[in-house]
Image (spheres, rainbow, N blue to C red):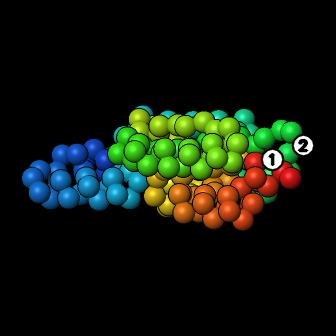
Amino acid sequence: MSWIDRARAQAHGALNKLPGKLGDAARKANEALGRPLADEAELEERRDFEARTAKSGDGAVAAPTAKPAATPAGDAAPVIVYYMEKQKRDVSKLTDILDANGIKYTVTNIQEDPAAQYAVKRDSKGLRLPVVFVAGDCVGGREQLINAASSGDLKKRVFGT
C-alpha cells in the first residue's frame, strides 16, 4: 500500500470520528466527491478492480486507450447499461431504445460496488446514471442514446456497419 493510500485510509478513520453536523457534512462531502477517503479494504478493492479490468481487456468500465475496431459483420459489441437503485425507474427508458433498435444488452446494478461506481463515473465523464456503454465507450444517458440511435451512430458502434 502506498503512503498516499495509507494517508487516505487514516483520513477516512478520522473523518468517521468527527461528531455532529461537522462530521455529517464532511462525510457527505467525501461521498459527493466519489469517496477519495476510504478504508484500507475499499482502497485495496479499487486497486484490484483496476488491475483486473486492465489485464482482462474487459473494457466495460476501463478507460479505453484507443477506439475499438469495428466488429466483424454479425458480431455485436457488448452493450451494458449501468445504474444504481435510485435510478432504477429510468433504466426502462434506455432499454426501450435498445430494444427498438434490436440491440442485445446487459443491465448492471453498481449500487454495492464502489470501484465500479468510480470507474463508471470516471469513464462517463460524470454523466448522470443510468448510462450505456458500447464496447467500453460511454454512449451516454437517455438523450445521448436517442441522438445516437436517430443518427445511426448507435448501430454503427454496436454492429460495426
Sooner in the amino-acid sequence: mark 1 or mark 2: 2
Query: Of residues 20 and 67, which is closer to you in this image?
Result: 67
Disc 1 + disc 2, Cβ < 8 Å: yes
Relative to 28, 124 lies left or right:
right
Which residue reaches farthest right? 73
Residue 97 appears in the picture as rendered:
yes
Q: Count neighbours of disc 2 (C-alpha within 10 A) and say few if under 14, some if 14 to 19, many if 20 or more.
A: few
Q: Position of residue 77 (x, y in %)?
A: 76, 43
Which amino acid lies under the numbered mark 2 shown in the image of this protein? Ala
Relative to 113, 68 lies left or right:
right
Query: Of residues 70 and 113, which is closer to you in this image?
Result: 70
Query: Of residues 64 and 97, which is closer to you in this image?
Result: 97
Relative to 95, 148 lies left or right:
right
Seen at 64% across and 46% down, the residue is 100
Which amino acid lies under the numbered mark 1 shown in the image of this protein? Phe
Seen at 31% across and 47% down, the residue is 12
Seen at 51% across and 54% down, the residue is 121
Seen at 68% across and 54% down, the residue is 137
Relative to 104, 36 lies left or right:
left
Which numbered circle lies on residue 159?
Answer: 1
Q: Is residue 45 above or below residue 3?
A: above
The residue that disc 2 covers is: 73
